[in-house]
Image: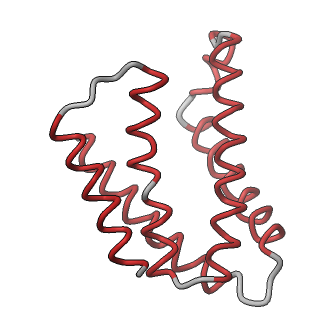
Amino acid sequence: MWYTYALLSAFFAALTTIFAKVGIKGVDTDLATAIRTVVILVIAWGIAFFRGATATMHTLSKQNVLFLCLSGLATGLSWVFYFKALQLGKVSQVAPVDKMSVAIAIILSIVFLGEPLTLKTAIGALLIIGGTLVLIS
């Protein structure tokens, strides 16, 4: 089932890129990011309320809150830079560079989370990096 959700995530991420490229024409990218964030805020809280997830907010630890906030900060900065890159570059070049986050996440997971680096994972990360270099050159 995770595979279905991952494919839906990839599909909507692709749509996000196309919609953003069209939507940022002649718009300050910081304003565009702010508008996008408000929409996501409303949707995310709506889903949390609808599914009853807010009832468990009291169970969050300080560590949960800290790292979720840090994740939000990283997401916000990612969006700011992504929108600026989309405004200046081609989708066919910006999107692959953005997806290098997969290879970077693999490296960070090894360094900070102690996850093992398997041969399969190393080859996959190298292929992502190589594919990115081919697409942007």
Location of the N terminus (image quadrant):
top left
Q: How many numbered circles does the render carry? A: 0
Residue at (37, 70) in percent of width and height: 133
Up-down: is 98 above or below 24?
above
Name the residue located 53 percent from the left edge and 85 percent from the top edge. 90
Q: Position of residue 117 (x, y in %)?
A: 26, 30
**In which image quadrant can residue 63 be found?**
top right
Residue 52: x percent and y percent? Answer: 57, 28
* Left or right: where 27 falls relative to 21: right
Q: Quadrant of residue 67?
A: top right
Q: Is residue 118 above or below residue 97?
A: above
Determine whether, in the image, residue 99 is placed left or right of residue 63.
left
Looking at the image, residue 14 lies above or below residue 54 = below
- Tell me, what colour scheme is on the image? secondary structure
Residue sitting at the far bottom? 26
In the picture, measured across the screen, residue 113 lies left or right of residue 33, that is: left
Residue 21 location, quadrant: bottom right
Closer-to-camera residue (8/45): 8
User: In the picture, which quadrant includes the C terminus?
Assistant: bottom left
Of 8 and 32, nearer the camera is: 32
Q: In x, y percent, where is residue 108?
A: 47, 34
Q: Nearer the viewer, residue 4 or 32?
A: 32
Residue in view at x 23 percent, y 50 percent? 124
User: Which residue corresponds to the image point at 43% horizontal and 78% vertical from the top-left?
Assistant: 136
